[in-house]
Amino acid sequence: MLKQIEGSLGIAEAVALCRPGAVCAYPISPQTHIVENVGKLVKQGTLKDCEFINVESEFAAISVSIGASAGGVRTYTATASQGLLYMTEGVYNASGLGLPIVMTVASRAIGAPINIWNDHSDSLSQRDSGWLQLFCESNQDALDTHIMAFKIAETVGLPVMVCMDGFVLTHAFERLDVPSQEMIDSFLPPYEPKEYLDPKEPISMGAMVGPEAFTEVRLLQQRKMVKALQVIEDVTKEYRALTGRNSGGLLDCYNCENADLKLVILGSSVGTAKDAVDELKKKGINVGIISLKSYRPFPYEAMRAAIGDTKKVVCLERAFSFGARGIICPEVKRAVEGTDTKVYTAIAGLGGRAILGSTIDNIVDYALNDKFTEEVTWVDVDHKVLNNYLQSAEGVTFPEGPIADSALKDSLRNVRA
């Protein structure tokens, strides 16, 4: 059914179609509307046989999710930014226990300084947590990916983060095609846990494991991750046949045939990039886009095939690993090991700064004209602000904390003046 609705409501309706038995809710922008609307669906009776649990923190949300999933029910929660960081201990526990929880991460910057707008620093900070991480281009993609996520999680026996751009998607109103309950029931059968806590047949879950077996436990977890690559492809193929939509998958290529340059992008920036690439094509500049949908597990073989014999690749990244380089770029470089393809990182869109068509144009110009002198380039930087701060600090050692913060504020005031 076609509906003109907010992205968050679309996700709430998708989650309800999957018939979770437990939803653990704590509000944090920009995901609040999702759990809020799931709560309304429970109260209205649209979502039946579901325990909607208001908890006192994000840590409680993941803890209750772990308990509910271990108890044998289909479980969902959502969070963002600092909320995800507050969950971290439980996030690792959920994957270590092999619990198929589905969690929306409405991606948002991590402070300090405080910033509530979108980038990918929260979700990518959990890249080694053992969760599958699926990224979404659009609200339709996000709606469909949530439905697929439950089947993927329950098939593999690992939790799944569905990462969608905060505000850019969660608060955008657009036309969405919401599947019928009958359609989703035919796709996603009732949850049958493989192992769960039952007072009638007591078992231990998450008991201590010593050095004699811990490596083997982690190896089994890794094998699940590797298996997930094929599961994602199989579930995506099944869902696409059911709906006729090109949602989900490991990655998606746009205008990649005979491209002189390919951009690897996560999330909603793909839409902007497609428009920019269409305009460039009219000028005879052929640029392809690889929309990376599955960051964990990383689809090395699919990425290598998508890049093909293209000699230049730029990873447009909305997060950064301090003291190192890009986060996506090293994985892409591993995918093309043994080839002469050059892979660069362009850092853009941090803290909600808009990625515009001109941003894409500049990145393409830099790449095609060999202006990338370093592996990492920071894009759309306001050098007037940056240089003013650096000049004010020249020859002076500022300690960390409020004094340094005041120096930056003074610098910004001078620039505005």
Image (tube, rainbow, N blue to C red):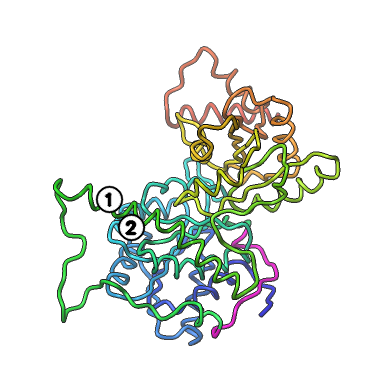
Say which amino acid is labelled 1: Arg
**Magenta stretch: includes residue 174:** yes
Query: For the point 40% across and 85% down, which residue is it?
Result: 49
Instruction: Tell me: 155 left or right of 300.
Output: left
Quadrant assignment, res 381: top right
Vertical arrangement, residue 368 with respect to residue 396, above or below: below
Answer whether labels 2 and 1 touch (C-beta < 8 Å): no
Q: How many marks?
A: 2
**Magenta stretch: includes residue 409:** no
- In which quadrant of the rendered image does the C terminus lie? top right
Residue 239 tag number: none
Residue 95 tag number: 2
At which x and y percent is residue 335?
Answer: 51, 40
- Circle nearer the viewer, 2 or 1: 1
Instruction: Tell me: 164 left or right of 399.
Output: right
At which x and y percent is residue 201?
Answer: 16, 78
Vertical arrangement, residue 108 with respect to residue 180, above or below: above
Q: Which residues are magenta?
A: 169-182
Say which amino acid is labelled 2: Ser
Q: Nearer the viewer, residue 409 or 193?
A: 193
Q: Which residue is mark 1?
A: 218
Query: For the point 67% across and 45% down, which residue is it?
Result: 354
- SS at badge 1: helix
The local crowd at label 2, few if under 14, some if 14 to 19, many if 20 or more residues have their Cα within 10 Å, is many
Instruction: Tell me: 206 left or right of 153.
Output: left
Q: Nearer the viewer, residue 342 or 22?
A: 342
Vertical arrangement, residue 398 with respect to residue 41, above or below: above
**Mark 2 / mark 1, whichever is N-terminal:** 2
- In which quadrant of the rendered image does the N terminus lie? bottom right
Instruction: Tell me: 354 left or right of 66.
Output: right
Q: Nearer the viewer, residue 276 or 397?
A: 276
